[in-house]
Image: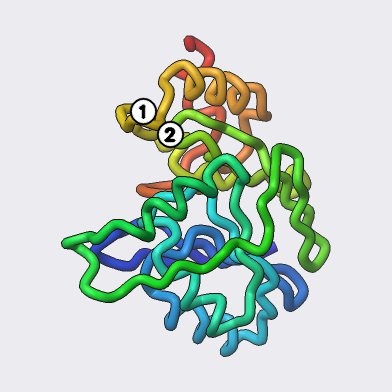
Amino acid sequence: MKIVKFVFPPLDNNVYVVFDKGEGVVIDIALGSEAVASFAKKHNIQILYLINTHAHIDHTAHNSKLKNLLNVRIALHKNDYPLLKEFFRTKYDFIHEELEFAEPDILFDDGYVFKFGEVEMKVIHTPGHTPGSVCLYVEKEKVLFSGDTLFANTYGRTDFPYSSEEEMIKSLKKLSMLPGDVKVYPGHYKETKIGYETWLKEL
């Protein structure tokens, strides 16, 4: 399994292309869909799914564009579907283009498994930042894509009206049970490992 990270200003979230044996997924497309599609085509990667770890616009802005470019299936946790529709009805001063809403093809729940190549990527529902926030775990590779749930030395915001500090703490406790050598690829900032985040054990 290979992982390639893109970061596109001004949203600056981490966009991941994860692939194995010519098949792959994109995790959290904000802007930059053309560059991601170009990379996939250049390397002959068939992108099967575009997975949103949550509905925030800095993780979903180019859902429709990437779907049109690569004919991918968009996947989102069912609890974030209402938020996704709300966010695409909102205007953003920092995005200088018209955003087009795309209906998700898959509204998944906890435990859903995405398969590509020889990879099995399992959904771990981690509400708190949003009701439908998820992490994506590849147990065989000891890799976790944590969205905006877990960052190096901290965690995602819980001060939005739809967020929950209580749910976030429960989610982080769940992640603390993973093996310490699991590498974490977050939605923003640098990578870390579960074992480095010793503060998780104190929650």
8 up-or-down from 82: above or below:
below
**In the rendered image, is residue 139 in sight?**
yes
Q: How crowded is mark 2: few (under 14 residues within 10 Å), some or many (20 or more)?
A: many
Q: Where is residue 16 in the image (x, y as percent from the top left)?
A: 52, 62
Instruction: For mark 1, give the secondary structure.
Output: loop
Dividing the picture into quadrants, the one containing residue 105 is bottom right
Name the residue: 39% across, 34% down. 156
State the image coordinates of residue 18 (x, y, percent, origin top left): 62, 64
Q: Which of 179 and 64 is in front in this view?
A: 64
Residue sitting farthest toward the bottom: 42
Residue bearing the label numbered 2: 129
Q: Position of residue 125 (x, y in %)?
A: 63, 35
Left or right of 12 in this view: 142: right
Q: Spot the residue most to the top.
A: 202
Residue farthest right in this picture? 118
As rendered, which of 185 and 193 lies closer to the eye?
185
Give SS at disc 2: loop
Distance between mark 2 and mark 1 Cα atoms: 5 Å
Q: Name the residue under label 1.
A: 158
Q: In which quarter of the image is residue 42?
A: bottom right
- 96 lies above or below 81: below
In the drawing, does residue 160 fall left or right of residue 126? Answer: left
Q: Can residue 3 be seen in this view?
A: no
- Rendered view: 139 above or below 65: above
* Amino acid type, residue under disc 2 in the picture: His
Residue 61: quadrant of the picture: bottom left
Query: Residue, x 48% and y 24% (percent of image)?
Result: 168
